[in-house]
Image (tube, helix red, strand yellow):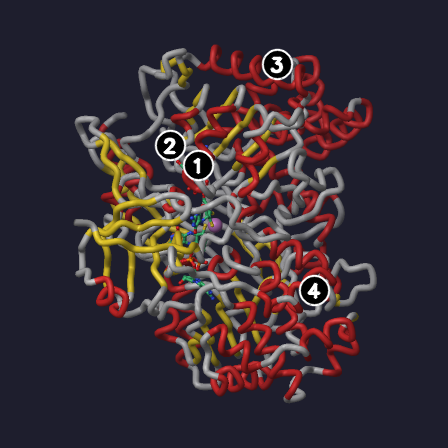
Amino acid sequence: MSESKLAAQSSDWKPTSCILCECNCGIEVQLGGDDGRRFQRIRGNRKNPASRGYVCQKAGRLDHYQNSRDRLMSPLRRRPDGTFEEIDWDTAIREVAEKLAAVRDEHGGESIFYFGGGGQGNHLPGAYATSTRALLGSVYRSNALAQEKTGEFWVNHQMVGRFVRGDFEHCEVGIFLGKNPWQSHSIPRARVTVREIAKNPDRCLIVVDPRRTESADLADIHLQVKPGTDAWLVAGLLKVLLEENLFDDEFIARHTVGFDDVRPALDAVLVADACRVSGIDEDLLRRTARRIAAAESVAVFEDLGVQMNRHSTLVSYLQRLLWMLTGNFGKLGAQNAPTALVPIAAESSRSPKTTPVAGARVIAGLTPCNLIAEEILTDHPKRYRAMLVESANPAHSLADSASMRKALEALDCLVVIDVALTETARLADYVLPATTQYEKAEAVFFNFDFPENYFYLRRPLLDPPETDQAGPLPEAEIHARLAEALGALPEAVLAPMRAALEKGGRLGLGAALQQAGARDPRLARVAPALLYRVLGPTLPEGTAEGAVLWAAAHRCAGIFPDALSRAGLEGEGPMLGEALFQRILDSPDGMVLSVDPPEASWDRVRTPDGKLHLAIAELIEELESLHDEPSLVSDDFPMVLSAGERRSYTANTICRDPDWRKKDVDGRLCISPDDAGRLDVNEGDVVRLVTCTGSAEVSIEINDRMQAGHISLPNGLGLDYPDSEGHRTRRGVAPNELTAAGHRDPFAGTPWHKSVPARVERVA
Ligand SMILES: Nc1nc2c(c(=O)[nH]1)N[C@H]1C(S)=C(S)[C@@H](COP(=O)(O)OP(=O)(O)OC[C@H]3O[C@@H](n4cnc5c(=O)[nH]c(N)nc54)[C@H](O)[C@@H]3O)O[C@H]1N2
Ligand SMILES: Nc1nc2c(c(=O)[nH]1)N[C@H]1C(S)=C(S)[C@@H](COP(=O)(O)OP(=O)(O)OC[C@H]3O[C@@H](n4cnc5c(=O)[nH]c(N)nc54)[C@H](O)[C@@H]3O)O[C@H]1N2
Ligand code: SF4
Ligand SMILES: [Mo]
């Protein structure tokens, strides 16, 4: 690079977004360093309509992601002795296509499993992977959502028929249930929003968490629940509302069905029991229920503290009863039904309904993560035999890592597409290096805001690295090459599409695609790769990977025309879709996708009668059987471990370099002063943490935010990372060495990572 170009580059602030959590706050980056590739300075981007300049402390450390020493620079192939050799892209693509096609031909495409598709900042790979999967006949897939959100999706589907979201910007009462927004965010400008609720005397912040979190410090009401007992707590709240006649009868009569089916089960709840089990003072519980009932609007956010815990699907259900029975849907500050450019939680008629081996429920098309190893480690003829992993690290992120590793090794073929040599990549037969999220166009499908919703196709800050090796490629390119190697997209198919685009513009291409798709349905299924090949090269510089969004924009315009018009997009039918796609391309800082009045939520309810459905028979049954529950703890394992807390410097396994963490570099185990005293251990001591699955040595932090009997480990640690000489050291404990796949919710199969029975032993 010339010196002047370098100088110009380093002084420019370039817009992009942070990729360390699903908020994807808009940032601006100044590049610099010897090669012009370092993230020299980073600040919030005020022009981003969702984050408006907001960032948390993590964004400033993104150079550790972009300039990681674990970066992959060449496709890798496993040798018979287990080591890797570098190969060129042509060989890699040909052999991967051949190997996967051979599995398909011998055992059927159903035996090829797809995991991942995007992390916190990149969802375009998953969209392009649909082409590869279609060509391979792969139908089963999963990703991290199937170890957190699928129970919630399932309940939403039954009760509302679609996804809903709480509006914390406008709510009077905001409830965070098993969620610590101060550290984990998940709503735009989380700290500002939470502080605003807390400091306004007319509003009320309620936090339900066994720890006194930073969010709890701000809360008007902190319900310091005993770990794993939220079902009792929320059932208790519902019973108080029923007893004290605090439900919104008019709303119930007008907008809901099924109340009579739920009522007896709620009536049977004993408030005193609920309080005893959950450890909450009855007076506080009653005051909380009254505050909720009195509010003009209530927004609720449930997250991993309950979703990765006992009775998670039941809690998702009871939580919804709480706001439905108090009339908190379809108004400002309550629950609403946001638009989405791409609906991630939608149920598809084409998805399998159960897993092939265990017959477990598949929700939103996703195999429960806790079942994946079980679906491989068997001689069942329908087992998964090959796997394509993209932008995910299941050997680290899924329950019981030891059995997950065994399962990945048992596959006939494992292919991993990643930027780094991860725990999962090390087990692969082929590793395909991807460009980073700052070297290609990227976007996520995690914007669920209401009344305004947003979208952001961001452009690359950097070219892919110059290297003597084969060099990384964007996933769109990898999937297009795989599609070609699998026999799709010959020039005979592409040429007429290019001609149609040239002659009739994008709408001309759309018409040609539709015609060709009607003649050959297989073509429709490789549309993402086809769009990348045909439309991609015609898009503005740096946006080629956004080609697949053209189809998404048209779909979105068909579903939400009014919401898009209210956001100032003009046109009808296909013209509106074009206007949306054009705005996506023309918005380097992100864009407002849609604007809704709260009433719009009612039009989006997708139950057959347009009402909210209060009764889910299976979950009413579970509510009725709550009192028979055995205790979580035992003599062997007297403590409850939350395995995977979000802290100020954790971000799943996106940043591998431990030095990216400014604090808590080793990820200590937090323990209450009481327990530390009982065990006679001191701050920083190394202890042995034991669960039924495994044990690990870890240093402790004595922390008065913890309640006695509860211990907590951070998420995303236990990665090894090379120093400048290439020597690898591991920092912290990988939480899933300690978790068990069988510890899971009976409905959704989601894990109980937040309540792992455990014990702490002193190390001599
Ligand atoms: N800093 C940071 N932020 C992140 C991430 C990250 O890795 N680091 N990851 C992102 C991702 S992928 C996700 S899914 C979200 C998750 O965001 P959160 O769900 O907020 O994250 P956690 O810290 O895992 O769990 C939330 C809280 O649950 C509490 N908890 C534990 N047991 C119980 C219980 O029995 N009942 C209740 N009510 N609470 C309990 C914990 O004490 C913790 O404070 O965060 C996102 N944001
Ligand atoms: N015990 C326990 N386990 C947990 C959790 C917990 O709380 N406790 N939390 C769970 C949750 S909520 C989540 S979301 C999961 C997350 O777990 P996973 O979904 O498995 O993924 P991540 O750890 O986020 O890893 C993302 C991967 O993407 C790679 N990557 C980054 N950028 C790119 C790119 O541009 N292209 C490609 N191809 N790859 C890229 C990174 O190198 C990394 O390997 O972990 C889960 N596991
Ligand atoms: S980690 Fe912080 S800066 Fe980055 S997207 Fe999340 S909230 Fe925003
Ligand atoms: Mo997550």
Tell me if label 2 and label 1 are in contact, CB under 8 Å. Answer: yes
Q: Is mark 2 within 8 Å of ligand 2?
A: yes
Q: Is residue 387 visible?
A: yes
Of the residues tagged 4 and 3, which is closer to the observer?
4
At horizontal 29% and vertical 41% (from top left) the residue drawn is 63
Which secondary structure lies at badge 2?
Answer: loop
Q: Which mark is residue 102?
A: 3
Label 2: which residue?
422
At horizontal 20% and vertical 28% (from top left) the residue drawn is 727
Residue 575 on image: x %, y %: 71, 44
User: From mark 3 to mark 2, how far is it between C-alphas?
Assistant: 26 Å
Label 4: which residue?
621
User: From mark 1 to mark 3, how far is it between C-alphas?
Assistant: 25 Å
Mark 3 Cα within 10 Å, few/some/many (few <14, many 20+)?
A: some
In the image: residue 302, left or right of residue 550: left
Which secondary structure lies at badge 3?
Answer: helix
Residue 145 on image: x %, y %: 55, 47
In the image: residue 636, left or right of residue 512: left
Which secondary structure lies at badge 1?
Answer: loop
Label 1: which residue?
393
Between 491 and 279, the one nearer to me in the picture: 279
Residue type for callout 4: Glu
Residue 585 on image: x %, y %: 54, 41
User: From mark 2 to mark 1, how far is it between C-alphas?
Assistant: 7 Å
Residue type for callout 1: Asn
Between 508 and 470, the one nearer to me in the picture: 470
The vertical placement of 129 against 590, above or below, is above
Mark 3 / mark 2, whichever is N-terminal: 3
Q: Quadrant of the N terminus?
A: top left
At horizontal 41% and vertical 30% (from top left) the residue drawn is 435
Mark 1 Cα within 10 Å, few/some/many (few <14, many 20+)?
A: many
